[in-house]
Amino acid sequence: MNLSLLIIIPLLTAVGVLCCRESKQVRTISLLGAIVQLALSLFLLFQYSQSHVVTSSDMMFQSSYNWFKPLNINYHIGVDGISIAMILLTACIVVAGVLISWTTEKLSKEYFFLLMLLSVGAYGFFISLDLFTLFFFLEVAVIPKFLLIGIWGSGRKEYSAMKLVLMLMGGSALVFVGIAGLYWNASTWDILQIAQTPLPIHIQKIFFPFAFIGFGVFTALFPFHTWVPDGHSSAPTAASMFLAGISMKLGGYGCLRVATYLMPDAAHAYSWIIILLATIAIIYGAFATMMQTDLKYINAYSSVSHCGFVLLGIGMLTKTSINGAVLQMVSHGLMTALFFATIGMIYSRTHTRLVAQLGGLLKVTPFISTVFVIAGLCSLGLPGLSGFVAEMTVFMGSWQNPDKSYRLATILACASIVVTAVYILRATGKTIMGPISSTYETLNDARWNEKLAAGILIIGIVIIGVAPFLINQLIGPGTDEIVTKVLGTVNP
Amino acid sequence: MSIDFLMLLKQEMMLIVIIFILMFLKLGKDRSNESYMTIVNALLLANVVIGFFGNEEGVLFAEMFRTNKLMVLEKNILNLGMLIISMQSFVWLKTHKHVPEFYILLLSTMLGMFFMISAGNLLMFYLGLELSTIPLAAAANFDLAKRRSSEAAMKLIFSSAFSSSLLLFGISLIYGTTGTLIFSQIPLHLGNNPLQIFAFILLLAGLAFKISVAPFHLWTADVYEGAPVAVTSFLSVVSKGAVLFVFVSVLYTVFKPLAGAWYNMLFILSLLTIIIGNLFAIRQDNFKRFLAFSSIAQVGFILVGISGSSTFGSASVVYFVLIYVFSNLAAFGVISLVSSITGNESISNYRGFYKTNPVLSWILTLALFSLAGVPPTAGFFGKFFLLFAGAGKGNYWFITIAALNMIISFYYYLRIVKAIFMDENDHPIPRVLIPLMPRLALYTCIAGVLAVGFISYIYDYIHSLSRGM
């Protein structure tokens, strides 16, 4: 399959949206584009599983064109299992995001255009095998957020938009230094070529922090997580879903594919710092969530905590833990998008997101409330849903690392689940149970578009929860390759 | 011989012919401004098109004048900038009394720049530089009724005179220590002689004045604010671009033996320039002042690329200037339209601009994104290649500071985007009708901003030309 289609289709959709006149046409075209994207990524999965030898970790469907010849820059794309998992996640969230924003009337043309541009950035990032192309798409996925949050957001939207973009751009400035350093020492931008010839360890030690912290900003690495609560809570619903579901995954994927994969020795040397920061993020995020009264803030802070698991998994550097990190990325993406979608549905009806003012919604809006419960249970790790699988894998993998202080970190991280249970159950209980305020008695339940959006995300969550081996087979070879790079070079 | 002579001096000759045509037109019967401008724009267009054909390398007048493909390309970039500026100033000049004079002044300036770029001798270089400065000061005074405009002209002429005297002092010291003024001879006589380094510093300071490198930038903001928008855009794009081209070629060829000395100087100057430009740009409310400081910061980034002192460095500078022509002129085009139709020049007036002028808002936004270096605009590629070239020396702390400074620049560019799209305003700038000429110019700029980055052929071509340096 020609992977460039994954960039071309959303781009065409975006251009098509610009040519429309009415908002009805705009959303129809966006939905069509999003569905084609989903179909494409499912087709990609199908072709991958057909033509793929289970043990091989090769990049599939590669193609490469010269772009800037003197600088050695190629447009080189290809996918392995990890990228395909990320592409599927992106496609699901794009469809759900378009469906959720179905009723957007304010400047709808610009809104859907920017959403599509964001998805171009995300797809391009996940399929790039060239550091320049990767960086290009990483930045493409940042700027639309400024406009999305600033124009259609709520609350302190300008402040949040500015803070988010400046922090993410700061992250990508660090990433720039990291990849420029890689180029000047390896004389190529190509990820596969750099991986084949490991750089000397003192070079790796210089540039690993740049790349890892740079991508870490995207995935809420402590102490660079402060954009998360503000950004998520001010963004319009679909943008929150994109932010938490896709953008934060760009960071995780980058930490894995660029920082850890290309500079394995440094990853090994610095793993204790990563684990320390990740553990702080997990615990701090969980306790900070307990204090929140706004549903969006609850989900945003819990995202800090959950993304901590991704970094913890990467830092532990065992096969199972890195598998768990990838699983957690997919699972958190789906779960948090579902959560934000539900919060959006509730907010559009009650015009409040404060837990204290809500209550008894189960009686009037059974569908929305059920979805809310599912998202919550997934977040606290109920078996049968994706959250359990992902977190369990991370914990098992972390425990495999025999170092005593690492095990302490694992225990602390495990303990945070109890805190998660407290805030999730409390929020769920207060929102959908209990007495209902008289003003909410006439609320309508979810419309078709909202049901469909939630349905798609729930299907993803349940599939991973019930049949985790499917996704394990998909991402296994990719994580194997990374782990052999990390461990192979240290203990030859 | 004579054919060769004409071919090598092709672009200079074209300018001289256009200047003479304009003079004769002025002598003839009175015409309407619009017919003048149609003629001028047609001539300038022809000038740009012809510039691309029949390029040769060669030397004339005992190495006073030399040319090669890279220089021809640089002059073409300046020609293109001139054409765009001319089309954009349509609305402003329509009611002006002295249209032909305005063009004669600007074209004489261009002529000076062309000779400066092609100079093979320090005296020729100085002559070109002077020719490119004095008419410009007269042009800065072209809002005849406004006192600020005269003030700008005065400041420009004083600071230029000062920098020229520094340059001349430097040139005389170079002549004194090497015994020659010819570019190809000077490197043979350069060594670690302190007097030569002192002479070089004087030369560097003189040039730094022209491209407003900190700490020689103080004249910039006032002149930009006072001069008419057309002249401001000429100053910030064409004039700056020309001196930057010369700067690169002089550093890389004539002063190559002193590379050890100038590498450190550039290193400090560029960081200082970026930081000062950025910090001052944050607080500006006048759009022209804002662009003045942002262009100071841009020059700082260009110096980062130059300090890489490699083919990458020189190619990325030329490439960046080309992109800068499109992006900065797109921004100036919008400002020029708005200022000549409604008289608004401050950023706070642009609040709620999107409600009334969606097309102009998007053009301005894309231009600002390109200046900030955000993909998919061309500015991203330009900035990336500059910083990348700077990293070639292995000085990563320098690059890190420069890259982190981009965050500050994002802040002030995005501040304007915020004003345009997000701020509420009860009295936004009314809908501005865009006449055909400026519309064409703006669309050209936006096409450049969107396309130049992706068409890698352009960079490849510039790179292949820079290889010989």
Image (cartoon, coloured by chain):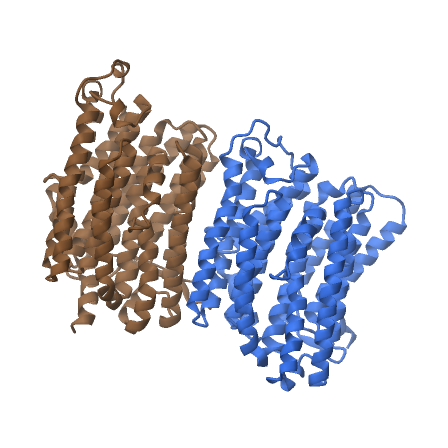
Chain colours: A brown, B blue
Question: In this picture, is B207 found above or below A471?
Answer: below
Work out whether residue B15 or residue A329 is closer to the camera in this orientation and state it.
A329
Q: Quadrant of residue A371?
A: top left
Work out whether residue B346 or residue B10 is closer to the camera in this orientation and state it.
B346
Q: Residue at x 18, y 39 (%)?
A: A379
Total numbered labels:
0
User: In the picture, which quadrant includes the N terminus of chain B?
Assistant: bottom right
Q: Quadrant of residue B88?
A: top right
B301 on left or right of A108: right
B350 on left or right of A160: right
Work out whether residue A220 or residue A73 is closer to the camera in this orientation and state it.
A220
User: In the picture, which quadrant includes the C terminus of chain B?
Assistant: bottom right
Q: Residue at x 82, y 55 (%)?
A: B21
**Residue B234 seen in this snapshot:** yes
B429 on left or right of B400: right
> Where in the figure is residue B151, as x and y percent of width and height?
76, 50
Q: Residue at x 76, y 69 (%)?
A: B127
> Where in the figure is residue A320, as x and y percent of width and height?
13, 56
> Where in the figure is residue B91, as x and y percent of width and height?
72, 40
**Residue A85 seen in this snapshot:** no
Q: Residue at x 66, y 43 (%)?
A: B336
Q: Quadrant of residue B49?
A: bottom right
> Where in the figure is residue A133, as x and y percent of width and height?
39, 57
Question: In this picture, is B25 found above or below B119?
Answer: above
A237 on left or right of A437: right
